[in-house]
Amino acid sequence: MTSTPWAILLCKFNDDASEPNSRQFYERLFTQVGNGALNIVDFFSDASHGQLDLNASQVFGWLTLDKAKSEYIGSGADPAGRQALIDWARAAAAKAKIDLGRFFGVVVYMNVPTDLFGVLGGKAMVGDLNSVPSVIAQEMGHGYGLDHSRKQGSEEEYQDPWDVMSTMSAFQAPHPEWGFVGPGLNAANMASQGWLDETRTWFGGGIVNLRPLHRRDLQGVLAVQAGDLYVEYRTPERWDAAIGDPVVLVHRFADNHSYVLPGTNGAFGLLRGARVEYGDLSLINGSWTSVDVLSIAAIWSQSQGAPWRAVHGIPSDAYQREFDLAIGQGYRPVWVNGYGVNGQALYAAIFEQRGGPALQARHGLTGAQYQQTFDQLVAQGYRPTCVSGYGVNGQALYAAIFEQSGGVALQARHGLTGEQYQQTFNQLVGQGYRLVDVSGYGVNGQALFAAIFEQRGGPAWQARHGLTGEQYQQTFDQLVAQGYRPTCVSGYNVNGQVLYAAIFEQGEAPLWQARHGLNSAQYQQTFDQLASQGYRLQRVSGYEANL
């Protein structure tokens, strides 16, 4: 880590004594006093993958310049005039016996609208009372040596809306204290300064699972360098909160500028299925690089309710990574489904970004491990909210979510045969319980069931299990016509036959859609289509089938 503290000189012209904002405002914005609130110290820590330390930055002033506002004539066309303003501020600091030699650079912050610029490689910038962190970060970036970012095929400045070095046209996120922050700094610009963490960078080709570029707190790869190209993943959070969709970006760096590359479809923000091609094999020693975006697991909804994300078809280690990523971003799992395909355990899950009681989640547990976990957590005041059974290579496994909360009486079962499940169902329903979660799964040619029952009232409900696809569709049509809607559907495979278990409730509800029998590609297509229409995924069940 390199210490690069800045001296922030709050300056006034000698004909205007106004002092906008409190001293604390500037200390929170520029120094460690405001760390954690997306201030300038936070920005350069994230933008440098922790290699820049601005914690020793210090605010001085207000200092009165020995000049009137009318004497300032600097502009983009008059760099000498701009340099004169910096010299005036340095002179005022010297008069106040401020030792600027202790600092990496100088920020001159004027009390009235004056100018906004950074000195390229000159460790200096000038701002005024109208400057917000987005543009301050860009101008301080100039002080470190960064120039404006561009798009491929153009030498026009400010053309990369996902990069802070294009703040004239960038995605700036509103901030309650300072106006606007972000976006982040792209990987090519980071690498040009030696700030890209090479221990978290994938070099060369292959299939790579990327983490968001600025999320050093998450395990995994943060960027890819393939030849002249840098590949990164950005999500709408923190500095990038205003970017909209999660996107993959591809950049190159040349002549001290980063260039964002378009996909073959012309879009610069790359979504699932996009492709970037770069190079020319017709040249001697020519090269060719292509980047394909295979999937983006983080899908965000602007529909009413908490932000959410969903994943499906991922193996155990990838699910654990997605789980850790979601938890780190303030999400909590609300649904998990395990299923076996070709002898491998796969997972689908739904996460929501909201608070709630303490939770515990497990997956890949054998029946004995699940029972032991169940007993331990229930003794600590937890209760299961979701349980999924699934068969892999002849063994029953379980995934579950537990929340530490009170509530009505609850009964949970797992590993029940069809006959045992029906018997338990009849017994508990007779005692005033209702089925709230059911999971069917096939193990060694036998159908097994896991279920959660709660002793409470509610709308009329119906439950079915052991239905073929045709029978399920018929039941679905009949019950929907009677005002019911499915609240839980579980597909499972027994001896090559796909069967369904489901719960339906009668009553008013928001507009909803339900599908079954979709392969992975069809499910993804349906998911994308319905999510874009404002629908949010409530339940998902995966299962092996010979389609």
Image: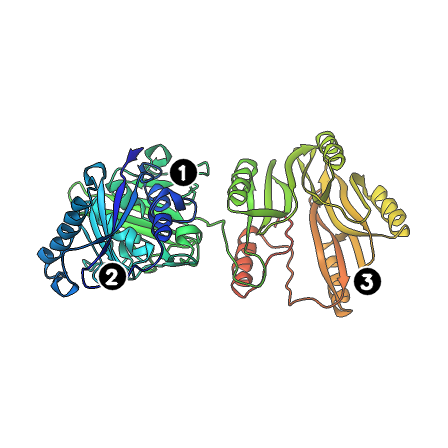
Q: Amino acid at mark 3?
A: Ala
Residue at 46% over, 50% down: 296
Label 1 sits on a secondary structure element that is: loop
Mark sitting on residue 331: none
**Label located before the other in sequence (3 or 2):** 2
Q: Amino acid at mark 2?
A: Ala
Q: Amino acid at mark 1?
A: Val
* Residue 542 falls left or right of residue 147: right
Foreground residue among 284 and 42: 42
Which residue has dot 3 on it? 460
Q: CA distance from mark 1 to mark 3?
A: 49 Å
Q: Quadrant of residue 105?
A: top left
Pointers 3 and 2 in contact (CB under 8 A)?
A: no
Q: CA distance from mark 3 to mark 2?
A: 73 Å
Foreground residue among 380 and 516: 380
The crowd level at tag 3 (other Cα within 10 Å; few <14, some 14-19, many 20+) is few
In percent of width and height, residue 181 lies at: 37, 55
In percent of width and height, residue 266 lies at: 32, 60
Mark sitting on residue 17: 2
